[in-house]
Amino acid sequence: MTEHMTVSDTAATPVKTLPDAQTVTEVEHYTDRLFRFRVTRPASLRFRSGEFVMIGLMGDTGKPLLRAYSIASPAWDDELEFYSIKVQDGPLTSKLQHIQPGDPLILRPKPVGTLVHDALLPGKRLWFFATGTGIAPFASLLREPETYERYDKVILTHTCRDVAELRYGAELVESIRNDEMLAELIGEGFADKIVYYPTTTREESPKMGRITDLLRDGTVFRDLGIDGISGDEDRAMVCGSLGLNTDMKAILEGYGLREGANSEPAEYVVEKAFVG
Ligand code: A2P
């Protein structure tokens, strides 16, 4: 797509004739950097909560411009939800941020990923460590009944620059805690298993600092009344920037956790959040 073209130009391209075209059903903007959208789900699409798919729009060459996006909705949902960054000069998100309900979206129905229950050995506590849009796969897993069947405690840490960027996660946790259908599926009291630990780095909030620093100096454990993280009981999933992932790997390995994969489950798994 050339610079002067608009999204309505994009919508006018014959995307609907592609077999992989879905329709946008809902869009919600949180900040000038973040938004969420929902699309129709291909009837044949099966995925495991936590996986990602390739989605995108038609590019200027007539070829689809696709990027890997974690599915933020759970496997049982009728629609698919995505949570995205907006990058003003990003090849895809500079256009994607303008989508409206009714617009077409290309979705390759081939889900993959390592942030899945199958890649972890059984444990007692499951930690989700997210920064920014890295919360997306955990938004899926937090709405997945299996998560609560497998673990006694599910701890979501989310570090963002400012308070406004925490809103998606805060609303998500609130809605899950009040979700009667989930309570019916999983059992009353499931909400007590969820621990939400939001932190900010660039704006004053009740808890400030990078999660990595708060782990290293023991603040997280003091705040949550937990002795620490150990390979015996704790399992972890990490999703954020390259820097977060590298730092968290070192921290978790220091606690004795080993990186797992679908083919060889272990104690923690990592995936990079999409940033462009
Ligand atoms: P910071 O403000 O100190 O860079 P972004 O919006 O750039 O993706 O960042 C999301 C959040 O992730 C920010 O709060 C940022 O903190 C934090 N962050 C960035 N790199 C790391 C890292 N290596 N370890 C922990 N947190 C990080």
Image (cartoon, rainbow, N blue to C red):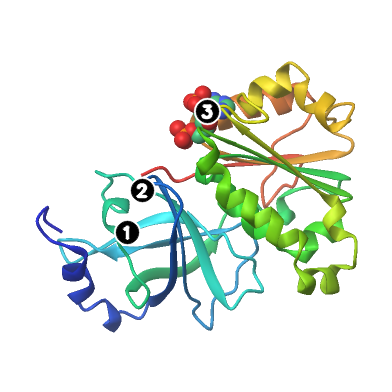
State the image coordinates of residue 146 (x, y, percent, origin top left).
79, 63
Q: Amino acid at mark 3?
A: Glu
- The quadrant in which residue 178 appears is bottom right
Tell me whether circle 1 and circle 2 mark residues in contact (CB < 8 Å). Answer: yes
Q: Which mark is residue 203?
A: 3
- The quadrant in which residue 143 appears is bottom right
Q: Secondary structure at mark 3?
A: loop
Residue at coordinates 78% horizontally, 57% vertically from top-left? 147
- Left or right of residue 87: residue 152: right
**Considering only order in the chain, which callout, 2 or 1, is on the residue closer to the N terminus?**
2
Foreground residue, 252 or 276?
A: 276
- Left or right of residue 166: residue 218: right
- According to the image, label 2 marks what residue? 86
Q: Residues within 10 Å of mark 1 (few under 14, many from 20)?
A: many
State the image coordinates of residue 38 (x, y, percent, origin top left).
48, 69
Q: Can residue 254 be seen here?
A: yes
Q: Residues within 10 Å of mark 2 (few under 14, many from 20)?
A: many
Foreground residue, 32 or 126?
A: 32
In the picture, the quarter occupied by the C terminus is: top left
Residue at coordinates 89% horizontally, 68% vertically from top-left? 187
- Left or right of residue 154: residue 3: left
**Considering only order in the chain, which callout, 2 or 3, is on the residue closer to the N terminus?**
2
Residue at coordinates 72% horizontally, 47% vertically from top-left? 264
Foreground residue, 53 or 266?
A: 53
Q: CA distance from mark 3 to mark 2?
A: 20 Å
State the image coordinates of residue 174 (x, y, percent, origin top left).
70, 56
Q: Amino acid at mark 2?
A: Lys
- According to the image, label 1 marks what residue? 96
Q: CA distance from mark 1 to mark 2?
A: 8 Å
Q: Residue furthest top?
A: 217
- The quadrant in which residue 97 appears is bottom left
Residue at coordinates 64% horizontally, 66% vertically from top-left? 74
